[in-house]
Every structure is written in C-alpha cells, then in structure tokens.
Image (cartoon, rainbow, N blue to C red):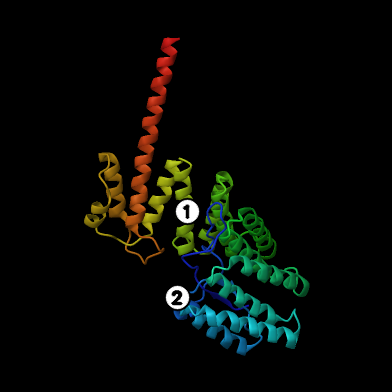
Amino acid sequence: MNSLLCEEPCIEETSDEGESLDLSFIDEKETEETEASFPNLPCSIEIDCSLNPRLKIFYNLVMGYIAKGSYEIAAPLCKTTLQDLQEKYGPHHPDVVAMMDIITIVYRGMRRYKDAAKIQHEVLDIKKKTLSQNDISIASTLNTLSALYGKTRKVEEAEKFCRKAVEFRKRVLGKNHVDVGKQLCNLAAICCHTKKYKEAVNCYQEALEILSCTLGPENTYTVKTKNNLASLYVETENYKEAEKLYKEILSYMPQEKSTKAEKEVPVLEETNKKEVKQQENSVHQKKETSSFTAKEVLKNLQNVYEKNGELEDQKKISNGKLDQGLNAS
C-alpha cells in the first residue's frame, strides 16, 4: 500500500467528559511526497492508490481542497464518488476501501471523529473478509480506530484497539520490527493518560530498545521516545532516570550558545548550575534530531534538579516530624 501521511488538526471535537487523547506520534509512516506537498493536512492514514492511478489523482485533488480548508467541497465530492464506486464495483472492492479511507481523512479534518470511526469500522470489517489474516493494513486500521477513539475521549476503546494493533504487528512483523516500536509508543501514551504508569514505562522502554536498534539512537522517533520516557520518569518522581535520559538527549543535539541558554534558565543551586553548564558545553554539532531544541531539554533538566531538591526537602521535613514524634513518645 501507498502510505501517505498528513498531520493532526490543532482543534478537535470531543465528548463532554475528560481530555482528548492525542496519538499523533506515530500514526503511520511518513513519505517525503506528502510532507513536501501537503505539510498541514489533518490526518495520517494509509491509502492504497496502487490499483487505480485515477484514484491517486482524486486523492491529490481532495488533499488540495483540505489544504485550503475547503471541506464543503471535499466532503460531498468524496461521498458522491464513494457511492459511484460502490455501484460500479460492489461494497468490498479495494477502490471502495481506499475511498472510505479518504473520506476518513476528510472527516478527521472536520473534527467529525465519530463519523470517521464508523467508517473505519466498516473498513476493518471489509479487510477481515477480503484480505489475508496477516495483511498489515489491518493493523493500520486498528491504529486509526485507536487514534479516533482517543480524540473522542473514549480511552477504553482507544486502548483496546491499540493493544490489538500491537499484538497484530508483533505477530506479523516480529517483536523487534520498527513499526512495533512505534505502536508501543502509542500504547504507552494511552497508559500515561489512564495513569497506568508502570505499564507505560515498560512500553516506552521496549519501544526505545527497538527504535534504537532499528533506527539508531539519534533518530527523531528514538529521541522523542526517550524524551517522553524522561517526562514520565519526572511524573513518577524517578528523577535520576529522567536526568540520565535528558543528558543522553542533549548529547545528540546541535551546539547552542550558552549565553542564550543561560538567559532562559532560571538561577539554580550552584552545583546544579554547573551540571547544566557542562551539558551545554558537551552538546555536539549535529543535525537536529527532533522537533524540540536543546534549550527546551536544558529547561527540563533544570526542572528535574528543582523537583529533586524539593523532594529531598520534603523527605527531610518528614523525617524531622517523625523524629519529633518518636521523641515525644
């Protein structure tokens, strides 16, 4: 299948309770063609245009409308075309499935996530009936459903489909495949959202091992996964591990002038200030490996030092109160 990636919208329609869950980290594989032609599109989903060149032209036309925000043109055009294809080829034809995926992209761009999920359920049913049980596009649909349910705050459904996608990819691709690592990152994000922190750590660690071996330690996905795991360590007060990961991330990033970084980093304890300074000086001159900058990572590292200091102070206070209680008894 031709994998054509578009990005998530900034605003989304959600349900009334809780927060929406963004699983846009690794929805599907990126291609230079889509990134160059349509940099601001609202969805990432795999479209199979290989069997019908005209469908590829139609896809590009729809993406052009979406790029302009002309959903009032794109939506009815897709709906009419889908009906024509169903009448011509029947409901299970590959072109029909591809058109349903294109409509899903349009609906996601319109924040009509429930309608998009309904269509993807139909796509999943068709694929299960017509494709091999090991066809990897089934995993793509499972992941898309997970992302859609995350957007509508149906986290249990999002988790269910994400787990199915992980299991499917492991079974078909092998446990150490790069797509397994990326899918594990999505599952980790869901576990963080549901406060299943232990499982989230395990998923990130497994993903990090896979991505480091398959893509390399300096790859964007690998570095971003490491950053997410470091943030999770901060959330769970595992500051030593967080510090270690942030320092590793800094070693992959381009050199930044210390004067600028110092202006943006608040005053620290002298020892911690030296630590941050040393990290600034040790950052290598390398190509940017992620969307975040060295200054942002330095701020995160500074935050670790501050929180670790607060934790130590709290322990001292607690121990002091405990000592007083023992003396009083």
Label 2 vs 1, first from the N-terminus: 2
Q: Secondary structure at mark 2?
A: loop
User: Looking at the image, which residue is at 48% across and 62% down?
Assistant: 221
Which amino acid, mark 1?
A: Asn
Residue at the extreme left: 259
Q: Which residue is mark 2?
A: 39
Mark 2: give few (<14), some (14-19) or many (20+) Cα within 10 Å: few
Left or right for 5, reference 134 = left
Q: Which residue is mark 1?
A: 228
- Residue 105 percent across, percent down from the top left: 57, 74
The picture places residue 108, in percent across and down from the top left corner, at 56, 70
Q: Which numbered disc covers residue 26? A: none
Task: State the image coordinates of residue 127 (x, y, percent, origin top left).
Answer: 73, 72
Name the foreground residue: 71 vs 180. 71
Left or right of residue 309: residue 22: right
Residue at image coords 58%, 86%: 58
Quarter that holds the C terminus: top left
Whether residue 43 is visible, yes or no, is no
Q: Which residue is at the far right?
A: 129
